[in-house]
Amino acid sequence: MRLPKFSCVKVASVEEASRLLAQPDVETCLSAGGTELLPRMKYGLSRPQKLISLKGVAAEAPVLGEDGSIQLHALMTLSAVAASHLVQENAPVLAAAAAAVGSNEIRNMATLGGNLCQDSRCLYYNQPHDFQFTAPCFKRGGDQCYFIPAGKKCRAVFMADTAPALISLGANVYVVGPVGSGSIPLEKLYSNDPLRPVTLASGEILSRIIIPARPMQRVEAFAKFSWRPGFEFSAVSVAVVLDLDEDRQTCRSARLSVGSIAAGPLRPLKAEAVLAGGRLSDKVITAAADQAAAEIHPVPHHGYSRVYLTECLRAQVRRVLHSAIGPLAKT
């Protein structure tokens, strides 16, 4: 498959890219690592006439603030995020999630910002439609879902692995736009609408990710299930961050986030409530996993049925909680 013809402009700053992106002269796309955009262009899912390349913008190294927060540049590659000692020491759940994305080749090219802003996916939509399919689905301007024929709306799924990890950490994102800049909670970046999964307006670009300071009594973990890790997107991914009391046995608060089973990352709030205030025993962990499986209803995708994904979710929540408290059991 070949790329369609397009022009390319290399910019020197995110602000310049924002100004160009907001100009409605021709269909324009932003390109950072290109690991998602270029296959989409080859498949004919995206046909921009002009690319704004961020290759000329240097990704700054992570910064540890005086208050203990971490600032990550959105153009850091996923391999750089995974290998950063600052991230490994202060946000190990994010390092694990970044390391779980795709293959080494993908992680060496893909950026953190690109991973957070990727499009939703489904088995029908992400195909070369010129020879295999001809009818447009909801995401291509049609009026039917061909993957789930009885469906009355798009059922594409959002699959960024780093999003659940950063949501569990309570991260904010700094957005640069043509009419102003500012930070918002990462959770608000996602619309839960598969046709437009992120809420960025025209010309707005993700610039930085800010992770709050890590308390002393915190444990965290990430788990991803896929039949072929490194080649396929997640079937289910789960991230957890637990803030503990001084006894390091009682959970003060919990943030669980689940990815790849809906149009955006989801937090099972009732399962978090099961964990908060209780001692972290097998019984409590099982109850939290059961609650997460009860309150989240996965969208079947890529050959995985809803029943299968529900049981995967239950197992992954148990696994990620045991992984998080594992170090405590050794003390």
Image (cartoon, grey):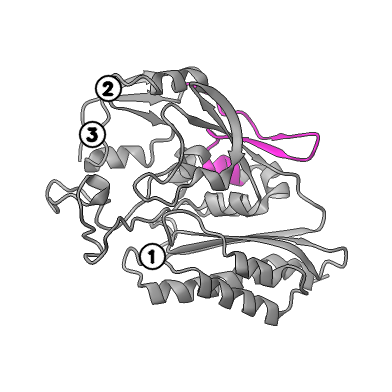
Look at label 3 and name its amino acid.
Leu
Residue denoted by label 3: 3
Q: Position of residue 106 (x, y in %)?
A: 43, 45
Q: Residues within 10 Å of mark 3 (few under 14, many from 20)?
A: few
Residue denoted by label 1: 299
Distance between mark 3 and mark 1 Cα atoms: 32 Å
Mark 3–mark 1 CB contact (< 8 Å): no
Distance between mark 2 and mark 1 Cα atoms: 35 Å
The structure residue drawn at horizontal position 53% and vertical position 50%, both measured from the top left corner, is: 163
Look at label 2 and name its amino acid.
Val
Mark 2–mark 3 CB contact (< 8 Å): no
Residues rendered magenta in the picture:
56-82
Q: Is residue 60 left or right of residue 46?
A: right
Residue denoted by label 2: 26
Which comes before the other along the chain, label 2 or label 1?
A: 2
- Say if 47 sits above or below 160 in the image: above
Look at label 1 and name its amino acid.
Val
- Say if 314 sits above or below 15 in the image: below
Which comes before the other along the chain, label 3 or label 1?
A: 3
- Viewer-nearest of discs 2 and 3: 2
Query: Which SS class for mark 3?
Result: loop
Count of marks overlaid on the render = 3
